[in-house]
Amino acid sequence: MRKMAREHVRYELQMMRLTAAGLKALRPDQVGERNVLIESFLLHTRNLRDFLHQKQGRDDTDALAVDFFDDPSSWLDKRPEPAEAIRNNRERMNRALAHLSYSRLEYESSKTWAVSEMRQGIEDAFSAFLKALPEERAAWFQD
């Protein structure tokens, strides 16, 4: 679990932050770069969304925040609701990003994403997660 926290969960958080910052720094004419960064941002945001907000994984190999508590209710009872920008874009992230599906056609008119709000929602939930963890385990996620 310590290895998962230090190497993988921290990586997802770092990449979400880096891509969000990169998006802010782009000029309007950098469309290709924007697409690369937004897809990376959304992938890492989606991974963190599932890590923080799912009660159980799709299978036994999914790493979830609840796994880091001896008593799952220690997280489940304190866990914040997903931020509005995360909730409102859940299906869109699932369909438009991760699957080459006809469902993408439903989202063609909406080319923008609420990057700042989504990032802040993950940051807030992750902060709550760290506060709920025992101090020793919270340290696994620190730089």
Image (spheres, rainbow, N blue to C red):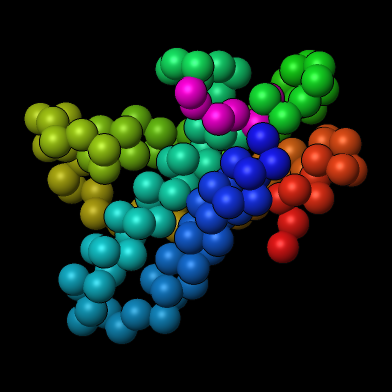
Quarter assignment of residue 82: top right
Q: Would you say 139 lies left or right of 5 here?
A: right
Relative placement, left or right, of 27 versus 125 is: left
Q: How many marks?
A: 0
Which residues fall within the magenta stretch? 61-66
Q: Is residue 15 above or below residue 61?
A: below
Q: Where in the figure is residue 95, as x and y percent of width and height? A: 25, 33
Predominant secondary structure, magenta span: loop
Quadrant for the C terminus, please. Answer: bottom right
Q: Residue furthest right?
A: 135
Where residue 21 appears, as percent x and y from the top left, is: 49, 72
Residue 129 x/y as whole percent: 74, 39
Q: Is residue 12 above or below residue 78?
A: below
Q: Quadrant of residue 14?
A: bottom right
Q: Looking at the picture, how far across and down is residue 7, in whole percent?
A: 58, 51
| Residue 20 shows in the view | no
Left or right: 103 in relation to 132: left
Q: Give residue 66's quadrant in the image.
A: top right
* Residue 94, above or below 125: above
Give the residue drawn at x 35%, y 80%. 26
Q: Nearer the viewer, residue 111 or 143?
A: 143
What residue is drawn where x is 20% and y is 72%?
Answer: 31
Query: Who is closer to the viewer here, 6 or 133?
Result: 6
Above or below, 128 against 143 in this view is above
Q: Is residue 75 visible?
A: yes
Residue at the far front in the pictured view: 3
60 or 24, nearer to the observer: 60
Residue name at image x 10 percent, y 30 percent = 102
Quadrant that contains the N terminus = top right
At 14% across and 36% down in the image, what residue appears?
Answer: 100
